[in-house]
Amino acid sequence: MARINVERSHSLGRAAARAKAEQLAERLAKEYQVSYRWNGDTLEFKRSGADGKIEVGEDRVRVELKLGLLLSAMSGPIKREIEQTLDEKLA
């Protein structure tokens, strides 16, 4: 089992960052059959072989992802994709 943790700062404010996280969750739901729900300012998501959360703060976003055995082999590319997506969306 692999764990991925990525944290980025932003200047969008909590509401705008939360809206970006919602857009990302909707895309993941369509493309990868991810289910998600909000728990306060934390977006919790899950699919077969992976689960995690996106914590949205006023000036920081933190992504934590746990990968099951099969997806663990892809942890490097998955982490790079998360980093690239955060950098694009939070700029």
Image: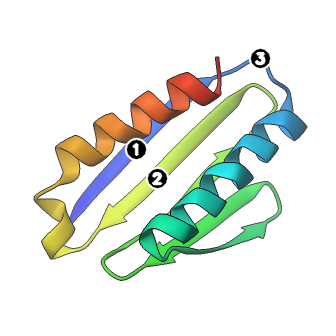
Q: Indicate the amino acid at tag 2.
A: Glu
What's the residue at 30%, 77% (across, down)?
49
Ranked by sequence position, the earlier of labels 1 and 3 is 1
**What residue does disc 2 label?**
64
Q: Indicate the amino acid at tag 3.
A: Ser
Ranked by sequence position, the earlier of labels 3 and 2 is 3
Residue 5: image tag: 1
Ranked by sequence position, the earlier of labels 2 and 1 is 1
Of residues 50 and 33, the one drawn nearer to the viewer in this rendering = 33
- Percent position of residue 88, x then y: 55, 24
Determine the CA span between mark 2 and mark 1. Answer: 5 Å
What's the residue at 64%, 17% (across, down)?
91
Of residues 7 and 48, the one drawn nearer to the viewer in this rendering = 48
Q: Residues within 10 Å of mark 1 (few under 14, many from 20)?
A: some
* Mark in front: 1 vs 3: 3
Q: Is residue 36 left or right of residue 20?
A: left
Determine the CA span between mark 3 and mark 2. Answer: 21 Å
Q: Residues within 10 Å of mark 3 (few under 14, many from 20)?
A: few
Q: Indicate the amino acid at tag 1.
A: Asn
**What residue does disc 3 label?**
11
* Mark in front: 3 vs 2: 3
Disc 2 to disc 1: CB gap under 8 Å: yes
